[in-house]
Image (cartoon, rainbow, N blue to C red):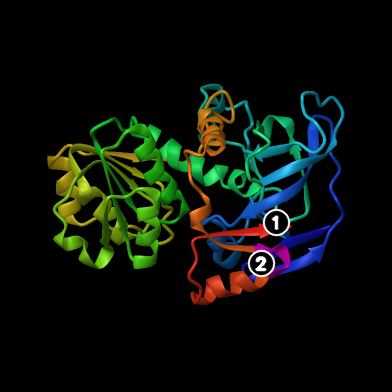
């Protein structure tokens, strides 16, 4: 089968690999669509993976190609969403249903071979029943949409009449805007560094779109702010955007050290702003209502996705696209590949 193999940071190759075999309790999936996650960029270009060489990719959908022993309730040809985390189910975090914080997990595309490939073997515990009429490209975006929902729930959600805000309008941020609307937010603010991303935020349902360069002039405040970038300026901006007594949830993953200004510290201290960390997207029963709710909203059409796809390419184009990511000469939103 064709597969993208990471040998070292920046050394990304299209190779021929043996097709996996479904073991007991597993299915063999023919990958339908696989998306680039923001975490793939540092993993594949800068830091490397947990082990290498490795087939990367973890945001994917697939059709069942073969059933392993003792697999029931699934059919050949069935489209499914896939949760990429394999929790240990033994640590205290797993036993309390906090699978995102598992102490000894496995993970497609970073710790075991993933989905930048034609086929992948997946435990049935990681499959999510999916209405068969849904576009496989949407189902491949279940992970980022679930991450956005998990982050909102971490802060207690948002209710009718409240104002939400999103700093960083990549795919996760665009899904966060939509979730806030679905939950009844009366107003949603979006902040990003480019007009192109703000145009997408408007399509997602944002009322007020603010360029980062103009943020210092902003007087608006939000009951819930989602930070989805992970750099100094956006982390500080997210806190300053919060209303008194509001909440800020951080999704963005910093690479260098983060510095908070004194004004930012004074803001969350004096205005009693609650700060929340949010990691991944999983709940109990595994993989959690974050995943089943997302699939349901894709099925009903309430959660929009097609407008954010900037590239939908053959898998063979992936190494070249990552070269352009490294060169920072490509404008993109959601990038999908067809193995």
Contact between marks 1 and 2 (CB within 8 A): the answer is yes
Please name whichever residue, 218 or 303, is drawn nearer the observer in this view of the structure.
Answer: 303
Q: Is residue 160 magenta?
A: no
Residue 318's label in the rendered image is 2
Locate residue 255: give its quadrant: bottom left
Q: Is residue 135 left or right of residue 172?
A: right
The segment highlighted magenta reads 313-317
Query: Is residue 114 among the parts visible in the rendering?
Result: no
Q: Residue at x 39, y 35 (%)?
A: 182
Q: Residue at x 27, y 30 (%)?
A: 160
Query: Is residue 88 among the parts visible in the rendering?
Result: yes
Task: Give the residue number, with chain letter if any, for mark 1.
Answer: 116
Tell me the quadrant of the picture where the N terminus can be found: bottom right
Locate residue 81: give its quadrant: top right
Please name whichever residue, 302 or 48, is drawn nearer the observer in this view of the structure.
Answer: 302
Please state the horizontal and vertical placement of residue 159, each as a whole percent of the image. Answer: 29, 30
Mark closer to the chain start, 1 or 2 = 1
Q: Residue at x 75, y 42 (%)?
A: 63
Q: Secondary structure at mark 2?
A: helix
Characterize the magenta stretch by its predominant secondary structure.
Answer: helix
Q: Residues within 10 Å of mark 2 (few under 14, many from 20)?
A: many
């Amino acid at each position: 089968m064709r597969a993208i193999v990471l040998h070292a940071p920046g050394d990304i190759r299209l190779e021929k690999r043996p097709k996996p075999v479904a073991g007991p309790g597993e299915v063999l999936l023919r990958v339908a669509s696989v998306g680039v996650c923001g975490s793939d960029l540092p993993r594949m270009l800068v830091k490397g993976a947990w082990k290498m060489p490795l087939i990367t990719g973890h945001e994917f959908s697939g059709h069942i190609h073969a059933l392993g022993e003792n697999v029931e309730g699934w059919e050949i040809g069935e489209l499914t969403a896939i949760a990429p985390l394999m929790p240990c189910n033994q640590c205290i975090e797993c036993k309390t249903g906090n699978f995102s914080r598992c102490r000894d997990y496995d993970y497609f595309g970073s710790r075991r071979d993933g989905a930048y490939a034609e086929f992948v073997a997946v435990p049935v515990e990681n499959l999510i029943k999916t209405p068969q009429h849904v576009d496989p490209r949407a189902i491949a975006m279940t992970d980022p949409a679930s991450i956005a929902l998990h982050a909102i729930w971490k802060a207690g959600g948002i209710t009718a009449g409240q104002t939400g805000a999103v700093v960083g309008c990549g795919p996760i941020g665009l899904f966060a805007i939509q979730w806030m609307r679905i939950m009844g937010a009366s107003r949603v603010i979006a902040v990003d560094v480019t007009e192109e991303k703000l145009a997408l935020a408007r399509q997602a349902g944002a009322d007020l779109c603010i360029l980062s360069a103009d943020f210092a002039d902003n007087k608006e405040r939000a009951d819930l702010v989602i930070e989805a970038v992970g750099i100094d300026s956006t982390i500080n901006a997210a806190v300053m955007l919060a209303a008194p007594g509001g909440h800020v949830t951080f999704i963005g993953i910093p690479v260098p050290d983060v510095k908070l200004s004194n004004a930012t510290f004074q803001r969350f201290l004096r205005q009693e702003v609650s700060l929340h960390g949010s990691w991944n997207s999983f709940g109990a029963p595994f993989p959690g209502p974050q995943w089943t709710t997302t699939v349901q909203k894709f099925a009903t059409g309430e959660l929009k996705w097609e407008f954010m796809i900037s590239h939908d390419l053959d898998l063979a184009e992936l190494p070249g696209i990552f070269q352009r990511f490294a060169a920072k000469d490509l404008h993109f939103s959601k990038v999908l590949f067809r193995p």
